Amino acid sequence: MKEPIGIAIVDKPAGLTSHDVVAKARKVFGTRKVGHSGTLDPDATGVLVLGVGRATRLLQFLTLLPKSYKGEIVFGEDTSTLDSSGEIVATYDMSSLTPSGVKEATKNFLGEIEQKPPMVSAVRINGKRLYEIAREGNEVDRPNRSVRVDRFEVVPTGNPMVYETFVDCSSGTYIRSLAADLGSSLGGGAHLRNLRRIGVGSFGENEALPVEKTVLQEPVEAMRDFEIVKVDDETRKEVSYGRVFEQGRLKVEKEGPWALVDQSGELLAVYKEHGDKIKPAVVIVDP
């Protein structure tokens, strides 16, 4: 039986970890070779891109794509997890908040910013994940990381302490931290609830399906946010053997990585720059 290969766009429900979704997908596609392109918190919902079979090797490129989220920021309460799943650890009188004031404060978080990973994140410190350390009741120093926020929009709701938020950001941005830091900058505190990832690059929630109903798309779809380079039959054969090329061989227009396809559009490999040459990062096609 031929091994399944491709990508699937899943709409992750609340209550499942990203690993739970992968486990379900293994049963759906009949293979253990399933991975995802970026963890979503158990309480979060939305777009989770899966790689199946040899296409799992393409996920390294999808993790680099920008992300889009929507959720709700609840002002006046800090929680132990920075979201609604945690215990309230502090309350503040923020009755003087105004929509214009909240909107003005978001401007301080646009562009390149520094974030400290929350203790409930999956970042490893000395080989141990932060959330494991937090479960033991401990806290450790963790270095800030640079992230980029391109959009941080806040919209008032019927509750003056709750604002709907829309965020476009780089991979690795913590939306929970963004909400908490916004609350702190306004003289109080805040936490996040109802987080939903609505986009990973060009992969949107409109094409995401429950894992039980998801369909396998061709591997080339994984690379649709990158430059696609069509090669002739002679080059196809060289690519299948993982041949390293001179820079000018592919006549590319953008920076790599580049997805190489044959004349029928089938994905052959993904190439990256390597000094003054270009070499395969992943080869999908068999010789």
Image: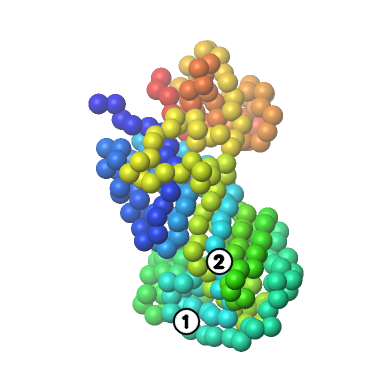
Can you identify the residue that label 1 sits on?
88
Could you tell me which quadrant the N terminus lies in? top left
Nearer to us in this view, 151 or 210: 210
Q: Is residue 155 visible?
A: yes
Above or below for 230 versus 96: above
Above or below for 80 versus 154: below
Q: Are marks 2 and 1 in contact (CB under 8 Å)?
A: no
Residue 204's spot in the image, x, y percent? 53, 44
Q: CA distance from mark 2 to mark 1?
A: 16 Å
Above or below for 204 versus 280: below
Residue type indicated by callout 2: Glu
Q: Is residue 54 visible?
A: no
Residue 82's spot in the image, x, y percent? 50, 73
Return the disc, 2 or 1, that comes first in the chain's sequence: 2
For mark 1, give the secondary structure. Answer: strand
Q: Residue at x 54, y 62 (%)?
A: 71
Could you tell me which quadrant the C terminus lies in? top left
For mark 2, give the secondary structure. Answer: strand
| Quarter residue 244 falls in | top right
Q: Residue furthest front?
A: 158
Q: Residue at x 48, y 41 (%)?
A: 207
Can you identify the residue that label 2 sits on?
72
- Number of marks: 2
Residue type indicated by callout 1: Ile
Side of 62 where 153 appears, left or right: right
Q: Residue at x 56, y 73 (%)?
A: 74
Q: Residue at x 61, y 68 (%)?
A: 157
